[in-house]
């Protein structure tokens, strides 16, 4: 009886150790693949199209800055699927309605987005579609500043100019996660154009 119990425990421990080693190998392979997968860093000019109208997506109310104010890091996860983190700054003019508040004076706009993208690419072009979640606020120095989450849909294009340098053009419709859902004045378009470094 003791022999059988010892044999069972030995077999159980061996199987457990084998399973753990297999799991560690998978994790190591995943980490190694992520380390070696392509990364794209982009600095862009930002154009925020927001006039406070929940149904208006046009170019008539573009807020823009001369200095590039968007930073994006794009990491390839698997084949044509990537994940990007985007941080944008802009300045909104006074008397615009943003996130249910009419701005009495010009204010700083800030947004942060996490998007997944899937695309079609070759040596020089990468056309993609994106979907994700974001957050935006104006007047970031105030705790009670108007703010909203967003559901993002859009697309863009990477074009390689030389081996490690290219251009990125991207446009995303950001639907505010406020009531009434989808049709509210937190909706806006975010357009960016800038230079990319392929690492």
Image: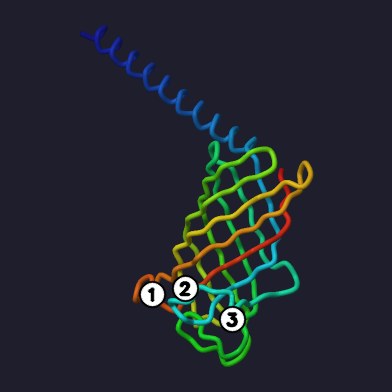
Check if mark 3's residue and mark 1's residue have beta carbons within 8 Å.
no
User: Residue 77 appears at what percent x and percent y?
Assistant: 55, 41
Mark 1, secondary structure of its residue: loop
CA gap between label 3 and label 1 equals 23 Å
According to the picture, the residue beneath numbered tag 1 turns out to be: 183
Q: Is 196 placed above or below 182 here? A: above
Taking the image as shown, residue 68 lies to the left or right of residue 145, namely: right
Residue at 69% across, 42% down? 124
Mark 2, secondary structure of its residue: loop
CA gap between label 2 and label 3 equals 18 Å
Taking the image as shown, residue 176 lies to the left or right of residue 46, namely: left
Q: Earlier in the sequence, mark 2 or mark 3?
A: 3
According to the picture, the residue beneath numbered tag 2 turns out to be: 187
Residue at 50% across, 68% down? 135
Check if mark 2's residue and mark 1's residue have beta carbons within 8 Å.
yes
User: Residue 40 appears at what percent x and percent y?
Assistant: 67, 48
CA gap between label 2 and label 1 equals 7 Å
Mark 3, secondary structure of its residue: loop
């Amino acid at each position: 009886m003791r022999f059988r119990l010892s044999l069972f425990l030995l077999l159980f421990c061996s199987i457990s150790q084998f399973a753990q080693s297999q799991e560690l190998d998978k994790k190591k392979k995943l980490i190694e693949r992520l380390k070696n997968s392509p990364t794209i860093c982009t600095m862009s000019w930002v154009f925020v199209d927001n006039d406070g109208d929940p149904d208006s997506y046009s170019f008539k109310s573009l807020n823009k800055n001369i200095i590039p104010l968007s930073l994006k890091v794009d990491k390839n996860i698997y084949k044509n699927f990537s994940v990007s983190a985007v941080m944008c700054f802009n300045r909104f003019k006074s008397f615009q309605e943003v996130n249910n508040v009419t701005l009495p004076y010009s204010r700083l706009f800030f947004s942060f987005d996490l998007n997944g993208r899937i695309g079609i690419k070759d040596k020089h072009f990468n056309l993609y579609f994106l979907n994700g979640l974001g957050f935006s606020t104006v007047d970031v120095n105030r705790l009670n500043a108007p703010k909203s989450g967003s559901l993002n849909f859009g697309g863009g294009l990477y074009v390689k100019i030389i081996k490690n340098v290219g251009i990125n053009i991207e446009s995303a419709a950001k639907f505010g996660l406020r009531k009434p859902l989808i049709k509210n004045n937190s909706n806006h378009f975010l357009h960016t154009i800038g230079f990319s470094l392929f690492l």
